[in-house]
């Protein structure tokens, strides 16, 4: 244990952007493992049921921490935002799990890189943020990268791809909420509330397709809960350490992990267009992050975004003083 404490102390002295990058790579590895586990388990269980069990076991992995902290772990100044994050996260998971069940691991992972691009569109359409020509150009290039992967008119373009893109859009919403929550809440509190709120919500669609899992599937679902919880804990720590624009580019490591796992366990070989398209999306995201840093315009905190007049009367409106839904 002393060695671990010494390592943690040394890591705390690393510059914040570097710490954020390390956390993001660890998150990428965890989520790639989760994607591979979903791909495997979906052959025997409906994706909606997997979403419920992933949430349930993810919540159970948080129980030891909650027992140590007690009710202090539930203290929050933003209960409404936790609820909105759970809803957006559930929508993203339902679409994502369905897409993973139907697409190769590397291909569905590559499409998830459109998340920062959807965040740009959302900032303009719903938050009234000003985006200049260079950022619009980078966004357009990124979506062109997605089209390279999908090749409209080819067999790859269909309902599974639309599900993956829908999941990416909702992930963008969730990422913005995680960023603001990480300013006042611990990573464990954010993940705990996600599990507490999302698990009962996920049970509703699961009941419509319910079948009893086989004994072997329980092992895979426990591992899904572990990988998902690890992925979210490291993701929240990445967002807490540095700006979203600074750490999101390192999420590209997820494709490398996913391609390896897809090849090793499912004999899936991503074609050259998947790599080219993913590289185009990554380049667009990296350019946007670099330009934001140079201009000194960090990604707008969600707390400010929710105060923006464009959000007045919206379903997602939250009182910034209390954190409760209006």
Image (tube, grey):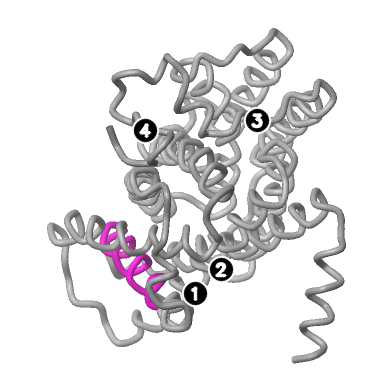
Among numbered discs 2 and 4, the one appearing first in the sequence: 2
What residue is drawn where x is 38% and y is 40%? 322
Among numbered discs 1 and 3, the one appearing first in the sequence: 1
Query: Which-is-in-front pick, marks 4 and 3?
Result: 4
Mark 3, residues whose alpha carbon is within 10 Å: few (<14), some, or many (≥20)? some
What residue is drawn where x is 53% and y is 28%? 304
Q: CA distance from mark 2 to mark 1?
A: 6 Å
Q: CA distance from mark 4 to mark 3?
A: 21 Å
Mark 1: which secondary structure? helix
Q: CA distance from mark 2 to mark 4?
A: 31 Å
- Mark 1 highlights which residue? 226
Mark 2: which secondary structure? helix
Callouts 2 and 1 close, C-beta under 8 Å: yes
Mark 4, residues whose alpha carbon is within 10 Å: few (<14), some, or many (≥20)? some
Q: Would you say the magenta stretch is mainly helix, strand or loop?
A: helix
Give x and y (percent) for residue 75: 41, 61
- Mark 4 highlights which residue? 319
């Amino acid at each position: 244990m002393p060695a671990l404490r010494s390592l943690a102390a040394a890591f705390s002295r690393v510059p914040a952007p570097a710490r954020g990058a390390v956390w993001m790579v660890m998150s990428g590895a965890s989520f790639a493992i989760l994607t591979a586990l979903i791909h495997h388990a979906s052959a025997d269980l409906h994706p909606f049921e997997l979403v419920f069990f992933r949430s349930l076991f993810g919540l159970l992995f948080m129980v030891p921490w909650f027992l140590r902290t007690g009710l202090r772990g539930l203290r929050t100044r933003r209960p409404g935002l936790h609820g909105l994050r759970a809803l957006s996260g559930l929508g993203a998971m339902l679409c994502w799990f369905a897409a993973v069940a139907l697409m190769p691991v590397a291909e569905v992972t590559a499409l998830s890189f459109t998340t920062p691009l959807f965040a740009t569109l959302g900032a303009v359409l719903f938050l009234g943020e000003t985006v200049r020509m260079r950022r619009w150009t980078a966004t357009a290039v990124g979506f062109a990268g997605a089209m390279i992967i999908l090749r409209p008119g080819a067999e790859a373009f269909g309902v599974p791809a639309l599900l993956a893109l829908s999941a990416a859009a909702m992930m963008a919403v969730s990422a913005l909420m995680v960023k603001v929550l990480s300013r006042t809440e611990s990573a464990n509190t954010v993940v705990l509330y996600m599990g507490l709120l999302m698990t009962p919500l996920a049970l509703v669609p699961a009941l419509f397709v319910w079948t009893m899992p086989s004994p072997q599937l329980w092992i895979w679902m426990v591992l899904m809960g572990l990988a998902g919880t690890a992925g979210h804990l490291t993701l929240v720590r990445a967002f807490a350490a540095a700006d979203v624009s600074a750490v999101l580019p390192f999420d590209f490591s997820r494709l490398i992990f996913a391609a390896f796992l897809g090849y090793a366990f499912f004999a899936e070989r991503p074609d050259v267009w998947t790599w080219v398209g993913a590289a185009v999306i990554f380049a667009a995201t990296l350019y946007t992050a670099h330009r934001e840093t140079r201009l000194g315009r960090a990604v707008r905190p969600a707390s400010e975004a929710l105060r923006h007049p464009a959000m007045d009367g919206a379903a997602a409106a939250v009182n910034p003083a209390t954190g409760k839904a209006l």
